[in-house]
Image (cartoon, coloured by chain):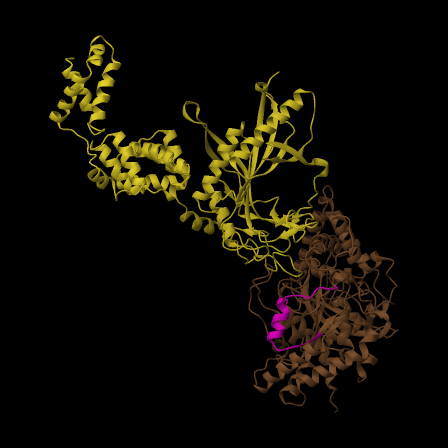
Amino acid sequence: MSRSDWEVVIGLEIHAQLNTASKIFSGASTAFGAPPNEQACAIDIALPGTLPVLNRGAVERAIRFGLALGARVAPKSVFARKNYFYPDLPGGYQISQFELPVVQGGAITIWVGEGENAYEKSVRLTRAHLEEDAGKSLHEDFHGMSGIDLNRAGMPLLEIVSEPDMRSSAEAVAYARALHALVRWINICDGNMQEGSFRCDANVSVRKKGTQPLGTRREIKNLNSFRFLQQAIDYETGWQIETLEDGGRFEQSTVLFDPATGQTRMMRSKEDAHDYRYFPNPDLLPLVIEPEWIEQVRATMPELPAAMKSRFERELGLSAQDASALTSAKEVADYFQAALAATGDVHAKLCANWVMGELAARLNRASLEIASAPVSPPQLAGLLLRIADGSISNAIARKVFEALWNNEGKDADDIIERQGLKQVTDNSAIEAMVDEAIAANPKSVEEFRAGKEKALNALVGQVMKVSRGKANPAQVNELMRRRLGI
Amino acid sequence: MTSAPFFDAPVSALRRALDEKDISSVELASLFLDRIEAFDSGLNAFITVDRERALADARAADERIARKGTGALTGIPLAYKDVFCTEGMLTTCASKMLSNFVSPYDAHAVTLLKQAGTVNLGKTNMDECAMGSSSETSYYGPVKNPWNPAHVSGGSSGGSAAAVAARLAPIAAGSDTGGSVRQPAAFCGITGIKATYGLISRFGMIAYASSLDQAGVFGASASDCALLLSAMTGFDPRDSTSLDRPTENYAAAIEAPSPNPARPLDGLTIGVPDEFFSEGLGDETRAAIEQALAQYRALGASTRKIALPNARLAIPVCYVIAMAEASSNLSRFDGVRYGHRAAEYADLVDMYCKSRSEGFGAEVQRRILAGTFVLSHGYYDAYYLQAQKLRRLITEDFKRAFAECDLIAAPTAPVTAWPLGAMSDDPVQMYLADIYTTPVNLAGLPGLSHPCGFDTAGLPIGLQLIGDYFSESRLLAATHRFQQATDWHLRRPAIARTSA
């Protein structure tokens, strides 16, 4: 039996930190990076007698999420207490939602893989609920002691739980990326993974292909990058298959991923699992969301990626894959739409190619986000218009793009003008260069006449070289063939 | 007619005396501080008395009085049960766990009373973490009954009740989770009222059982209680269970003139639940209650039998819910950020175990364990969930009852104050003493206890009046009429008749 006889089943729990100004149950600031315990008020440190008050902004963000996923926004949900002792959990319980979460159901369409093998898939959500974060324990900085930083205690989180719908680490990563893009798209979470604003837990099990019952699952905790998510799932999948193939067994448990070794290791087994003694928090009334509130929130929702994607396909004639890529992040979509608008809403395909091609590659090389691209959407649009009207070739366009990137001119026309890059379309000028090339390369001419089609490319290339790329390639090709008597 | 000494004067008389400069707030505060110093060693009603702070409050009040910027309570001394957080002052909840806790903030009720210009005499003794019915479980030792120091004061707000009964404070604030204001009021022969759940903010009151806890007040009369209660109520956005409704002036409400002064309670229907007069009720208490009901009828009220069939379940229901909530509420006392931490420990778990075992007394530990049990996986449905279902039934009983009557009358407790230590070995027996008070907390209703007689041992007996939601005015007004016609509320233990 081999690895290909097995199927992996993955469900994700994602904690998205909501971008409210204050915490979910107190007025303390949520700004990142303050010195330890400077953003922990009496409620956050659970002084005797303090009480939580729900931040409506956190609820509004949960509603936005529910609407974006086509989920049910529960008219009534309940905050519960999850009881356990740990020094960074000041109250001895975490306020979370248990039996009645605020968001129920929903689904998201993901695009998995690239190129020919890429495919679409829908992943269902079980639920999303509001809860507070715990503080941080710092075990390294104090000799023989642990430090406790409660700045994070009470940070608003939306825990998003998927159904076990994913069948590979690639699907899991695609799902996590899609959610990551979505929460930023609808502006409920900054998505900063380094700062822990978006963290994933992965529930992984394996089963023989074609079998129904789920295998024993292990939960990998706290994966804070897509790369770690992929590595951890791949390692865990391999480990589970190997263990089972060797006739071994394992228990339902929680494991940690060590990025240094690329391995997962046991944190606690099911037997060690806490009995959290959930019960409704008597300090908070049930959360009631009236239909009017949902409608108010709906009115502020931006066009969602799925709707925008189909619009791009329908109205701009883009392929599903292009439309999907352009709506993979709000900033990309914003850039694309701004550039397209600046071309006068024509040249959608050209614009899409440039945004996903040259621009994406250049940003990648420079490790920049699209929002901070040195070439603005109107600048790109100016460039695209010159390509479209035949003023410059694609090769020249790349030069102009690079010049724009390096701020060598205010727009494409300026650079073309200043650097004399305008395409040569004058037939007589091109004819002269064609004749020159034929005269200088008798060998190529001979080969071509002998039937070697490729030799023509060498001759055309010669003309392009002489014209420093400015000659219109189509014209060169046509004149070359005519001169060679075809 | 000789007027009462200042330490035994009604709050309204103190108001006049202060405004007319017959006495200053500083003098009044000193009078009570001296009484505390002279008599409290025999009662143990106070945990913390801060003379300097009290006198500073009084000086500020005197300045306000001089500027004529007074309210009803400006310059009036009072005491707080030690569940109320008071800024810069020890706030212990009568527990070793918090024996070193100086609160950095004021409870909402304390803020309101500070703004009213009251003088904080000190923090009163109580059952540890408000868990008890006798004020014997305090880390600071038991509170003694001013009528007989060999007997308990009742609890858990026993210190506040004893202080008012002994005239160590004119009025005091307490809290009531299952009877903790009404029962010690009855045991100490004074008037005590617990408000409708949500009327007084719980912010800054150290929680015992969040869905049952509600503040209350003690005074020698309904009139004194009305003044204090009016100043403590009001919406607080920091308590999600606080009710956003206009505040009422209860003192003004109870003074409203009656169209029929001979029968001022004409038209008032008092329901008398059979279930509260059954087995277990002491004969002397029963007789005193029946006599009080006759008095109410003489004042024009009519009485009728009503049924509260599920009330008999209140003790187990209330205790299951209270202990469950308490097991979670008290988790914050872990020795990590404040409070008691064991001197030595091997590791984190050991630190928790030792700190909490040392910091909490037996009764608190018992309730944490029982509460943890009823919330545990596999037991939750049978205990906690079942208790919540029964709680609804009990609440519905009251709803039906109030369709037939305006107020409900019942004994406050089945017995009078028992001798110190008499029930300490039998916690369940002690829980059962809350039989008549716990249903009120489960329904979130307001309840009042006023004195209505004495047993042959000379210990006070209390009558409980229960009202519909927000009927504090009606409860206080009925009691006020009763007290205008009777003198039970004027009886004083010897200690309260003695000058310091």
Tell me residue A243's x, y (percent). 66, 24
Give the percent coordinates (x, y) of residue A356: 36, 33
Is A183 rendered above or below residue A202? Answer: below
Tell me which segment is drawn in magenta: B99-121
Chain that appears brown: B
Q: Residue at x 64, y 47 (%)?
A: A140
The extreme left residue here reads: A428
Q: Is residue A69 visible?
A: no
Q: In the image, is residue B104 part of the stretch drawn in magenta?
A: yes
Residue furthest out toward the top: A450
Residue B221 located left or right of residue B105: right
- Whether residue B402 is visible, yes or no, is yes
* Vertical position of residue A207 compared to residue B466: above or below: above
Q: Give the image quarter of residue B315.
A: bottom right
User: Percent position (x, y) of residue B424?
Assistant: 86, 60
Residue extending farthest to the bottom is B1
Q: Quadrant of residue B108?
A: bottom right
Name the side, left or right, on which A122 lies relative to B268: left
Q: Is residue A67 left or right of residue B411?
A: left
Q: Is residue A120 magenta?
A: no
Tell me what residue is drawn at x 57 percent, y 70 percent: B247
Colour chain A is painted in: yellow
Q: Nearer the viewer, residue B131 or A366?
A: A366
